[in-house]
Image (cartoon, rainbow, N blue to C red):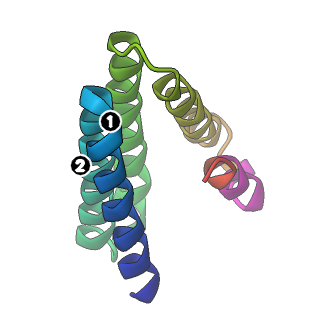
């Protein structure tokens, strides 16, 4: 629980920074980060006793996040949304690889998802 509190503290500090200095792109990007993290937290919490359902729902959240981040990258004049969308492609690719080859689950999968964090 301490990790979750620390994460949301850092996320709120990041949002404040983006809102103050990031302009419209920073405000939208920060809002998308918060919305996606809350959606992920809700899925993980609601389906904590059903790992099969969670394994199916988390990639959907990540795919929605990729769509939002790509839209932000296309609509923005800044460069950082492109990098963030590219990192999210890594996460979605990791999910896709697990869907196609379930035996790969394990350390490689988690390394692919968290490498950019």
Q: Which residue is drawn at the image coordinates 25% and 59% (left, top)?
A: 38
Q: Does the image show residue 12?
A: yes
Q: Is residue 101 left or right of residue 19?
A: right
- Tell me the tag on residue 26: 1
Closer-to-camera residue (101/81)? 81
Q: Quadrant of the C terminus?
A: bottom right
Numbered disc total: 2
Q: Quadrant of residue 23?
A: top left
The residue singled out by tag 2 in the image is: 35
Compared with 48, 94 (above or below) is: above
| Segment tinted magenta in the rendering | 104-112
Badge 2 density bin: few <14, some 14–19, many ≥20, Cα 10 Å: few
Closer-to-camera residue (17/96)? 17
Q: Position of residue 7 (x, y in %)?
A: 42, 71
Q: Which residue is drawn at the image coordinates 41% and 40% (left, top)?
A: 62
Q: CA distance from mark 2 to mark 1?
A: 14 Å
Q: Does the image show residue 30?
A: no
Badge 1 density bin: few <14, some 14–19, many ≥20, Cα 10 Å: many
The residue tagged with tag 2: helix, strand or loop?
A: helix
Q: Quadrant of the N terminus?
A: bottom left
Compared with 13, 59 (above or below) is: above
Q: Quadrant of residue 110?
A: bottom right
Give the main secondary structure of the magenta stretch. Answer: helix
Task: Of the two numbered discs 2 and 1 on the same chain, state the one appearing first in sequence.
Answer: 1
Compared with 32, 115 (above or below) is: below
Q: Position of residue 109 (x, y in %)?
A: 68, 52
Q: Which residue is drawn at the image coordinates 25% and 38% (left, top)?
A: 27
Q: Which residue is drawn at the image coordinates 74% and 49% (left, top)?
A: 104
């Amino acid at each position: 629980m301490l990790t979750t509190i620390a994460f949301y503290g850092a996320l709120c500090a990041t949002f404040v920074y983006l809102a103050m200095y990031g302009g419209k792109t920073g405000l939208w990007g920060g809002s998308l980060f918060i919305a996606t993290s809350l959606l992920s937290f809700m899925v993980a919490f609601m389906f904590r006793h059903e790992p099969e359902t969670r394994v199916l729902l988390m990639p959907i959240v990540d795919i929605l996040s990729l769509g939002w981040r790509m839209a932000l990258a296309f609509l923005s004049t800044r460069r950082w949304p492109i990098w963030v969308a590219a990192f999210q492609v890594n996460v979605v690719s990791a999910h896709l690889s697990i869907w196609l080859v379930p035996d790969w689950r394990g350390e490689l999968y988690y390394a692919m998802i968290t490498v950019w964090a």
